[in-house]
Image (cartoon, rainbow, N blue to C red):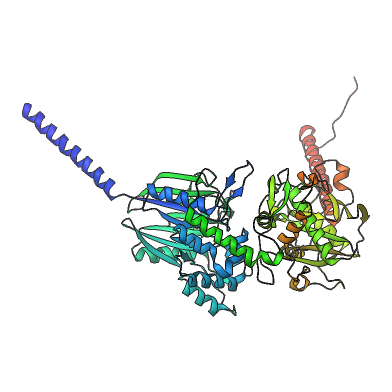
Amino acid sequence: MKQRAIRLLSVFLALLLVVVLSAAWAEGSAKTTTILFTHDLHSHFLPQLDSQGGESGGYARLKTAIDQEKAKNPRALLVDGGDFSIGSLIQTLYTTQAPELRTMGAMGYDAVTVGNHEFDHEGTGFAQMLQAASASGDKLPSLLMANYQPAPDNPDRLDIQRAMASCGVRQYMLLERGNVTYGIFGLMGTDSDDCAPTSGFVLEDPAEAAQRCVDTMKEQGAQFIIALSHSGTSDKRSASEDEQLAKKVSGIDLIVSGHTHSTLDQPIVVGSTYIVSAGPYCQNLGSITLKWTEDGEKTLVDYHLTPIDETLPKDQEIDQLIDRWKSQVSGSYLGAYGLSYDQVLVESNFDLPLPKAGVQIGNGLGELVADAFYWAARQELGDEEPIIAITADGVLRAPLYQGDITTSMAFDVLSMGVGQDGTSGFPLVSCYLTGAELKAVAEVDASVTPLMPAAQLYMSGMDYSFNVHRMPFNRVTNCRLVSDYNSYELEDDKLYRVVSGMYSAQMLGTVEEKSMGLLSLTPKDAQGQPITDFTQHILYDRRGNELKEWYALASYLGTFESSGLPLQYAQPDGRKAVSHSWNPIALVRSPNWITLTAVLLLTMVVLLAAFIIRQVLRAKRRRRYGKSKPRFFKR
């Protein structure tokens, strides 16, 4: 009996040893990976003020956060998901000095991909940036582009390809780090490509390119696959490109997702693929740590976003590099405007926040920008002809907070685009619209904004009102021209001068097409001829410079230097009156054919419903009393 017990105990101990050794072997075969990531940095070299009075972003502080993370995980990779350019005055050195790529190299980035804003200077400007980066001799991150190439009919195709080759641009890379072979590739998304209409590049289907890269890298020994995707995520699954990518492509372990400026407090998990985003403008440094086995099983060990704020000290080397970029901007770009980088233009006693997406109401910042365009155009045009100035939500890129407002802050508000002169910033352009077309512009604001928040408009020189509950494309109830504190009725057939930024003006030219002909709007010249090339209608200042959007704002702010920014901009001033009334008369007053058609259809539906109800009641009565009419007797 005793010997049997000893045998059973021996078997049990042997089995226990096998289990322990198996677990230890499994633990030993698992690998741990840490990826540090950013995206949509948008040239935010310097900290920005935030609404709480603190600071956010800045590459010198970002470098400190990177160093702190690498001290904990020395084998961590550092990558970026695109749109590393366009968003501050330092972007004005993009084509000549490539400060974005060179600074990212100094911060230790291993790999980055491109976004749509890398092509704001078109394909040729992108090539010039690559040449400048390569010629600098500085350490650069690997630039990965798997599905974006110069179009075959692009006349500059060979020059662009040479620049890409000189800078080592490739579709994917294999990187050995800590006994792990990483496969990393870069993708441009479909919407991102749509946002770069002048790139001169063609897009290969992202899922097809991704699967090709994954298969090729795995054949070459890649163990962990990372996609740097400038595609983005969305609350609407069908529009969440990177979630769709993860569903369609097998073998991607991690997607660093840019473009939609998403901030994900926790990764999105699709199958065995993790999707991460850290937010735009250098607000955070993202970090994800995964434990994984060769058979693809992954466990999330850690995920966190480190805020880049005033609590972090600045890395001195990066801070000095940024000071050199600032000095070059003041000499090469701002000198032509008689301004300096940190020059104070005016003091504000209140915040001017960005518009809230999809909220149809006035906005102090939008109205300030529209008034700046109006003022600048009046200064340069010099005549007394009525002017309507227009700007759009989509071109307003940064708020203005209480305190000193500087040149660089004014630029940040309107940092998008490139002029015909090849320098940063959209110029103002002038065109003409009829009174009827100006009413259609107001209708764009009233009817298109709920579907496309970036289309929300702010105007100077015209007041208008609309009811959000009226029929789409018949929501505007009143439009009046405002000049010298007087208002006038718009004449449908009369031409009125309109001033706007190049991008907004071009978008006005697409309204008829995008509204499927429901709104008719064609920008014209002074003789009433349709404009086909807005570059012929750019406004210039007295120095001969293109009258840039940002410079119009900076100059207008400078006119208030002694008195401070007027309180009228602290809140919407009523020039755009938005009604939410359900009053039936208000809903159908002054109907156009759309409302008349809707009322007719509604009437027909009501009549049809009444007819059906009547027939049903008749049928019930027949079933109850038979075919003959019921008889009623008096007592």
Nearest to the observer: residue 243 or residue 199: 199
Residue 552 location (% of width, % of height): 75, 60
376 is higher (above) or lower (below) than 602: below
Residue 441 location (% of width, % of height): 80, 58
Residue 117 location (% of width, % of height): 60, 63
Nearest to the observer: residue 544 or residue 274: 544
Q: Residue at x 56, y 62 (%)?
A: 325
Nearest to the observer: residue 596 or residue 570: 570
Q: Residue at x 85, y 52 (%)?
A: 463
Residue positioned most to the top:
635
Q: Is residue 337 visible?
A: yes
Q: Residue at x 74, y 54 (%)?
A: 448
- Quadrant where the N terminus sits is top left
Nearest to the observer: residue 130 or residue 8: 130
Horizontal side, residue 8 vs residue 283: left or right: left
Count of residue discs:
0
Horizontal side, residue 360 vs residue 86: left or right: right
621 is higher (above) or lower (below) than 148: above
Residue 477 location (% of width, % of height): 87, 50
Horizontal side, residue 400 vs residue 607: left or right: left
248 is higher (above) or lower (below) than 171: above
- Quadrant where the C terminus sits is top right
Horizontal side, residue 191 vs residue 316: left or right: right
Q: Is residue 1 visible?
A: no
